[in-house]
Image: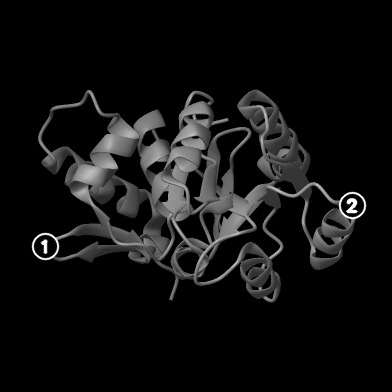
Amino acid sequence: MNNYTILVVDDESRMRKLIRDFLIQKDFNIIEAEDGEKAIEIFEKEKDKINLIILDVMMPKLDGWSVLRQIRQTSKVPIIMLTARGEEQDELFGFELGVDEYISKPFSPKILVARVEAIIRRIYKEDKNRVKDYGGIQIDTEGRTVKVDGKDVELSLREYELLKYLVDNESIALSRDKILNNVWNYDYYGDSRTIDSHIKKIRHKLGKKGKYIQTMRGVGYKFEIK
């Protein structure tokens, strides 16, 4: 399940590590928060890339119910609640607030992973087959094709992966090192100037839409539609 990011919120570091270790084995990207306030802070910054939240109920500063209420004001991101209490009333309360799944502690990490995968498939499977439009740039993630205002654009596999990485992180400034690590993978030791070369080619092929790929001086690049 590549390219899916999960926010794990729990005040117990051992619990976060347990969940992280099992989800990483399935190629999920993990972001962690140690309390409710931190969870809200992270979600506000990363909401466009977070695909699912695993949220503990009992936490300091801001409990899971409060976090859930705040997130549900602006987002329908799937949320799995973790709690030490298994009372029916708590579960009903959670579902009323918009919980997608409810798991009581202690639980089997393998079962948690299975439920995460089931939710991801249910919610995002249809999404993967749709063509997404980014200001006139249409990307078909199933066919791995790109069009600009309906006209086909021929991109190499690496150019496609680089463009896709930029649009998936829209409005986020990405360093050259981060781009290398995520597009060329961690075992790549080449010169970061190869990114500049690929960006130049992509901009040329996108025509007027190439302006969406902005150079962040001293940092790297950012895709932003203006």
Residue 28 in sight from this viewpoint: no
Q: Residues within 10 Å of mark 1 (few under 14, many from 20)?
A: few
- On residue 226, the disc is none
Between marks 2 and 1 in the image, the one whose residue lies nearer the viewer: 2
Q: Residue at x 64, y 24 (%)?
A: 110
Label 2 or label 1, whichever comes before in sequence order? 2
Q: Position of residue 142 (x, y in %)?
A: 63, 34
Q: Residue at x 44, y 39 (%)?
A: 14
Q: Quadrant of residue 173?
A: bottom left
Q: Quadrant of the N terminus?
A: top right
Q: Position of residue 204 (x, y in %)?
A: 31, 52
- On residue 88, the disc is 2
Q: Quadrant of residue 207?
A: bottom left
184 relative position to 1: left or right: left
Q: Residues within 10 Å of mark 2 (few under 14, many from 20)?
A: few
Q: Amino acid at mark 1?
A: Gly
Q: Between 86 and 93, which is closer to the camera in this rendering?
A: 86
Q: Position of residue 62 (x, y in %)?
A: 55, 71
Q: Amino acid at mark 2?
A: Glu
189 relative position to 38: left or right: left
SS state under label 2: helix
Q: For the residues marked 2 and 1, what is the alpha-carbon distance in whole angstroms?
A: 54 Å
218 relative position to 86: left or right: left
- On residue 218, the disc is 1
Q: Position of residue 209 (x, y in %)?
A: 42, 63
Q: Between 152 and 71, which is closer to the camera in this rendering?
A: 71
